[in-house]
Image (cartoon, rainbow, N blue to C red):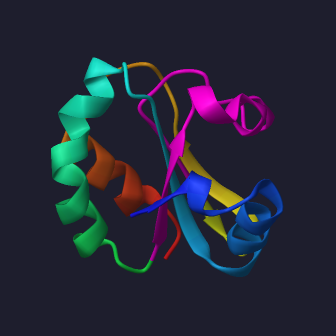
């Protein structure tokens, strides 16, 4: 998974506009984020049709505000610049919940 800090904000917007992207919002202090992180490689592998990008919510508050992401861990899906789904709240998420969310997204 690429880290957002590997992009500047304009590059991130270009990637979101040109591809099928899943943003994974997290923070270092977030215990619920640490809970799902070990499962992320498997989730990514099973959903390789997305470009996965990890975004530290605290370090990127402008983007988080723009996308209305305050609760973490959260996921926002895009297809060629259009938001196609979101799993945004402050609740702990299991691998099964993330997969169920992805299954609801347009193919």
Q: How many marks?
A: 0
Left or right of residue 90: residue 9: right
Q: Relative to the observer, which residue lies in front, 107 or 29?
A: 29
Residue at image coords 66%, 62%: 7
Whether the magenta-drawn stretch holds residue 57 is answered as yes
Residue at image coords 35%, 78%: 48
Left or right of residue 75: residue 70: right
Residue at image coords 43%, 57%: 104
- In the rendered view, would you say 75 is above or below 46? above
Left or right of residue 85: residue 29: left
- In the rendered view, would you say 95 is above or below 15? above
Q: Relative to the observer, which residue lies in front, 5 or 27?
A: 5
Q: Relative to the observer, which residue lies in front, 99 or 26?
A: 26
Q: Relative to the observer, which residue lies in front, 38 or 67?
A: 38
x and y percent of residue 15 in the render?
69, 73
> Which segment did they paint magenta?
50-77
- Determine which quarter of the picture holds residue 4: bottom right
Q: Say whether residue 41 is visible.
A: yes
- In the rendered view, would you say 53 is above or below 72? below
x and y percent of residue 60 in the render?
67, 36
Q: Say whether residue 96 is visible.
A: no
x and y percent of residue 40 in the render?
25, 54
């Amino acid at each position: 998974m690429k880290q957002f800090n590997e992009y500047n904000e304009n590059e991130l917007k270009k990637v979101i506009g040109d591809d099928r992207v899943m943003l994974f919002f997290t923070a270092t202090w977030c215990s619920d984020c640490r809970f799902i992180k070990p499962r992320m490689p498997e989730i990514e592998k099973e959903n390789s049709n997305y470009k996965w990008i990890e975004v530290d919510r605290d370090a990127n508050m402008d983007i988080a505000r723009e996308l209305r992401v305050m609760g973490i861990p959260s996921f926002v899906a895009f297809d060629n610049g259009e938001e196609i789904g979101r799993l945004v709240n402050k609740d702990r998420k299991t691998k099964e919940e993330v997969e169920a969310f992805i299954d609801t997204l347009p193919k």
